[in-house]
Amino acid sequence: MTALQGIEVGEELPPLKVEPISRTTLALFAGASGDHNPLHVDIDFARSAGLEDVVAPGMLSMAYLGRLLTNWVPQERLRTWRVRFIAMTPVYGVPVCTGRVTAVDDGDGVATIKLAVTLDDGTITLLGDATVAIN
């Protein structure tokens, strides 16, 4: 019997609230990901592009969603995962990742999870879904 047997539509994944995204976080993510877009690390460049300050890469929030999913199921159970970037995450934003089971298909042995990243001010920055093996 797996830990996922018996999950039901409407079940909520334990939310993941991360620390405010600091400039250090942005610099470390740029180094780890190889994404050195100046919009994410150079305030002068961000201002020249019409922004007040640097913004976090969307892929950082997607990585946090990955942590949400793998905190709930082992990585090898992840079958699909996609997101749509909705809004920018400002430096010092506080992302909260959530997921809710929207479908369970015992025949195919998968559950579908609706995903979201929301800032503490209510701004939704990412929406997506994933499927995970339940058998």
Image (spheres, rainbow, N blue to C red):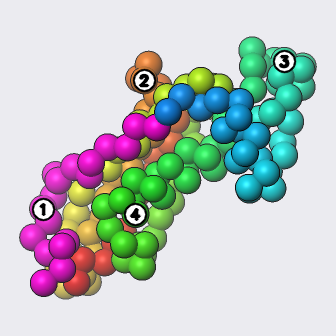
Q: Is residue 119 left or right of residue 21?
A: left
Specify whether residue 124 is in view.
no
Residue 122: horizontal and vertical position, in percent? Answer: 41, 23
Mark 1 and mark 3: Cα distance apart in space = 47 Å
| Near-viewer residue (21 or 80) | 21
Q: Amino acid at mark 1?
A: Glu
Q: Is residue 134 left or right of residue 6?
A: right
**Quadrant location, the N terminus:** bottom left
Q: Quadrant of residue 104?
A: bottom left
* Residue under numbered circle 4: 70
**Residue at horizontal 74%, vertical 55%?**
32
Q: Residues within 10 Å of mark 4 (few under 14, many from 20)?
A: some
Mark 2 and mark 3: Cα distance apart in space = 24 Å
Q: Nearer the viewer, mark 2 or mark 1?
A: 2
* Residue under numbered circle 2: 120
- Label 2: which secondary element: loop
Q: Residues within 10 Å of mark 2 (few under 14, many from 20)?
A: few
User: Is residue 86 magenta-colored?
Assistant: no
| Near-viewer residue (42 or 47) | 42
- Residues drawn in magenta: 1-18
- Label 1: which secondary element: loop
Q: Tell me the number on the disc at residue 8.
A: 1
Mark 2 and mark 1: Cα distance apart in space = 28 Å
**Residue at horizontal 32%, vertical 68%?**
73
